[in-house]
Image (spheres, helix red, strand yellow):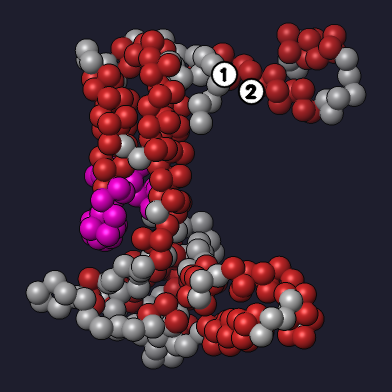
Amino acid sequence: MLRGPGRWPMPGNLLHNPAEAVERVVGRHRAVLREGLTSYDDRTEDGQTRENPGRTELDIHGRPRPLVARTRERDQQVHERIERGDSLRAIARDLHLDCGTVNRFARAADATELLFAATHRPTLIDDYRLCLHLRWMEGCTNASALAREIQQLGYRGDVNTVRRHLKPYRNGTIPQTAPLPHMIVRRVTGWITRRPEHLTDTERKYLTELYEHSPALATTTTYARRLALMVRERRGEHLALDVWIADVRLDGQRELRTLANGMRRDHAAIQAALTTTYTSGAVEGNVTRIKLLKRQMYGRANFDHLRRRILLPP
């Protein structure tokens, strides 16, 4: 978890290490993500969710997924053969499946567990589906213009991906509700560790709903943001770090408790990072440069040659 002795004084590490701990907490609670969040267009006036069975068995445009029917059929075949006492190798041979695939079907509690990964595959356009949907409903149907808009928001794909995404819209298959982002561990971790003021209204709503399903994620967010605020604003007031460590060790998730124990051991270095302007950034930069030079030599030169390259750069 820790980045190594002498590296805690870097403020970046003080944010990187907690982010890794938060990602492990979210990963341990990924079952909450699998429950699926409801679009706020799917709520009734009293806040209750409308009935919408089989939502994950449909794609973003409401079309049945062929993969779903195929997976359920294979799951039923595999478990029927297992109940009959057939070996996994024999099942794989008769069904023309890979042994690893049959093992996954055998280990899974039901087909829904297998379908989650298939129906929630992340893509480059996931974070911008809601924006594209809203802009289309506002009357902007030019794919090139929409691609430029979301590229300004951070989209790294090309206009052809946007065109493929909008093709069903042009054919009249427009979702009745705003598309939901896929709930994956890294995305939710980003929401938790990002500055609250940088979150969109939709992301805040989804986080609020996650907190309702999992109080552990709510407390993890509180502790992560408290520490991030301390680091970003260089709040090194007396006992602030000690109070945070004590609170986390008292009722934080085990990943955060492990982080707090490491911070307790390196308390002096972390306190110095919060209260002084000194940094090991220049040293770390030189170490990175030396490692780069060493890798460029591919082990073909001796130490003297490496020393000359470091001291006498071109």
SS of the residue under disc 2: helix
> Callout 1, which amino acid?
Glu
- In the rendered image, residue 206 lying in the magenta stretch gets the answer yes
Q: Are marks 1 and 2 in contact (CB under 8 Å)?
A: yes
Query: Looking at the picture, does residue 16 appear above or below residue 59?
Result: above
Q: Position of residue 283 (x, y in %)?
A: 56, 13
Q: Residue furthest front?
A: 85
Q: Is residue 201 visible?
A: no
Kindly identify the residue that appears in the image at 74 percent across and 71 percent down: 99
32 inside magenta stretch = no
The secondary structure that dominates the magenta segment is helix
Question: Which residue range is magenta in the image?
Answer: 188-217
Residue 288: mark: 2
Q: Is residue 259 above or below residue 263?
A: below
- At x 27%, y 19%, the residue is 242
User: Does residue 113 appear to the left or right of 313 in the view shown?
Assistant: left
In x, y percent, where is residue 155? 46, 57
User: Element type at marker 1?
Assistant: helix
- The answer to which quarter of the image holds residue 98 is bottom right
Cα distance, mark 1 to mark 2? 6 Å
Looking at the rendering, in which quadrant would you find the C terminus? top right
Residue type highlighted by circle 2: Thr
Residue 284's disc number: 1
Which x, y percent locates residue 153?
Answer: 39, 55
